[in-house]
Amino acid sequence: MLAVFKTDRGQVRPHNEDDGGVFINSRGEMLAIVADGMGGHKAGEVASGIAVSLLKEQWDEVNQNLSPTEAEQWFHEHVAAVNKKIFQHSIENSQCEGMGTTIVAAICTDRFVTVANVGDSRCYVLNDQGYAQLTEDHSFVNELVKTGQISPEDAAHHPRKNIVLKAAGTQEEIEIDTKTVTFEEGDKILLCSDGLSDKVSKAEMEGILKTPLPGEDKADNLIQLANQYGGEDNISLVIVEYEARDESRCNEC
């Protein structure tokens, strides 16, 4: 498995509230995470940092190969724990009141990928069936699209497109979405914050992922394009590419 995590402050924001990473447990299986924090006085980066550090800590303790059902259950249990920890931190620290974070994460094995998300950070898959978004945004404009009030094209330019309806840490209990897909040699997974997906089109992402470049260069090109289009938000992404087991390695872990 080849993997790379990249994050960039963008062209406008004074600091980066995103976090993420690629983490390998003792069984050699991979957890990839992107978290987009929100909240005043840099509280967003506190929330995203808690999410990533706690999930990494719990992933390090996994000492068996998980089935798809177990992987989904792992996410439900540990994202709930992340939610409670962020929520409690915001109560105990007034400067962090109201903070939260999106989470999109993937357990990647040589048999399947299980994805979990809360908020509007996304996961895409590129395989022999094409390039598709696996996650559903928990956002105001997506609800408008689902109820037929606006078109997907209108959603891309809607003035309230950045309103998130669900985020980890903003309430005491939270529900997350999970999905499992097969993962085969040649397949690619992209996790990203909305700093990328709001600026770079699905077709442009697909084109860059299909180029015969190293993952590092693909990640740099995606970030460069988002910045070229304005870079109003922080930009974070993980690219995971399936390779033969004997070539398995991880960059930027």
Image: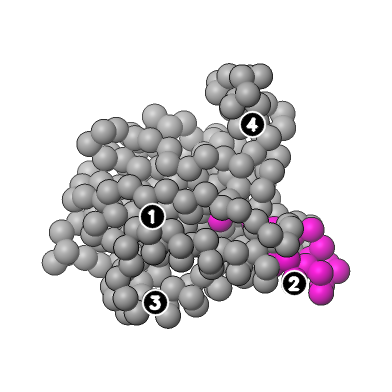
Are circles 1 and 3 on residues that touch, CB within 8 Å? no
**Residue under label 3:** 62
Which residue is at 29% across, 33% downward? 130
Which residue is disc 2 drawn over?
89
Residue 85 as seen in the image, left or right of residue 76: right
Report crowding for label 2: few under 14, some 14 to 19, many 20 or more residues within 10 A (C-alpha).
some
Which circle, 2 or 3, is nearer the viewer?
3
- Answer with left or right where residue 111 lies relative to residue 16: left
Gap in angstroms between the C-alphas marked 1 and 2: 28 Å
Range of the magenta residues? 86-103
Q: Amino acid at mark 1?
A: Thr
Q: Position of residue 149 (x, y in %)?
A: 66, 19
Q: Residue 86: x percent and y percent? A: 69, 67
> In whole angstroms, how far apart are the C-alphas of marks 4 and 2?
30 Å
Residue at image location 72% in from the left, 32% down from the top: 160
Local secondary structure at mark 4: helix
Relative to 38, say whether 164 is above or below: above
Q: How is the image coloured?
A: one colour
In the rendered image, residue 88 lying in the magenta stretch gets the answer: yes
